Amino acid sequence: MNAAVGMYDIMERRVTTVEQISRKRQPLPELDAVYFVSATDATIDQIIADYSNAKKPTYNNAHLFFTTPVTDAQLDRIKKCKKLIARVKTFQEVNLDFLTKETNAFHFDLGVGSFSEIVNRPRCNREEARHCLLHIKRIPAHSVQGRQCDVRGYRSELSRPDE
């Protein structure tokens, strides 16, 4: 978060504490929690643990913002925690899993030839197709302030000659 917004800006919005989910945190059951996290099994486990005790939850209500897509298995685990579900007020995927290389450019950090594989793939199974669509849908989302984004790629040594 530090790359996008400073602590002063956060405190100006009446946020009282900012803590890392991986560390032991003081219970504040009278306050709502805003979780701004990557959707990993470890973060899902920690969020569930924060609400596992209905009589003494770590926080009041939960506002969940995930910076990466939540898998179906992770979503099922969240849904199974009824004590958490009762307190979820916001659930959103923000999809910020890209690297900003310069002011008007970004990179998905997918590896060599990945974009070509996403766009030119002749057949995908259901999970691969879902993964491909997630990356392709992000491209127009990165147009900022009315500017159109350009997609640049390169042909890798691993590309087939007929591509």
Image (cartoon, helix red, strand yellow):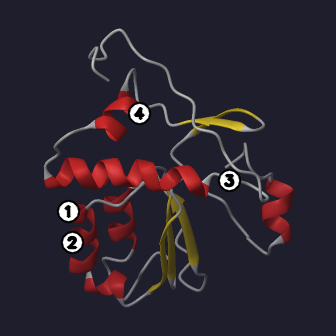
The label on residue 143 is: 3
Secondary element at tag 2 = helix
**Residue bearing the label numbered 4:** 115
Q: Is residue 150 above or below residue 134?
A: above
Q: Is residue 115 above or below residue 126?
A: above
Between marks 1 and 4 in the image, the one whose residue lies nearer the viewer: 4
Secondary element at tag 1 = helix
How far apart are the two marked residues, 1 and 3, measured between alpha carbons?
A: 31 Å
Q: Position of residue 152 (x, y in %)?
A: 57, 30
How far apart are the two marked residues, 2 and 1, measured between alpha carbons?
A: 5 Å
How far apart are the two marked residues, 2 and 4, measured between alpha carbons?
A: 30 Å
Residue type at mark 4 is Phe
Whether label 2 touches label 1, CB < 8 Å: yes
How far apart are the two marked residues, 3 and 2, measured between alpha carbons?
A: 32 Å
Between marks 3 and 2 in the image, the one whose residue lies nearer the viewer: 3
The label on residue 62 is: none
**Front-lying residue, 161 or 109:** 161
Residue type at mark 2 is Asp
Between marks 1 and 3 in the image, the one whose residue lies nearer the viewer: 3
Badge 4: residue crowd in 10 Å (few <14, some 14–19, many ≥20): many
Which mark sits nearer the N-terminus, 1 or 3? Answer: 1
Whether label 3 touches label 2, CB < 8 Å: no
The label on residue 73 is: 1
**Residue bearing the label numbered 2:** 76
Q: Position of residue 39 (x, y in %)?
A: 39, 55
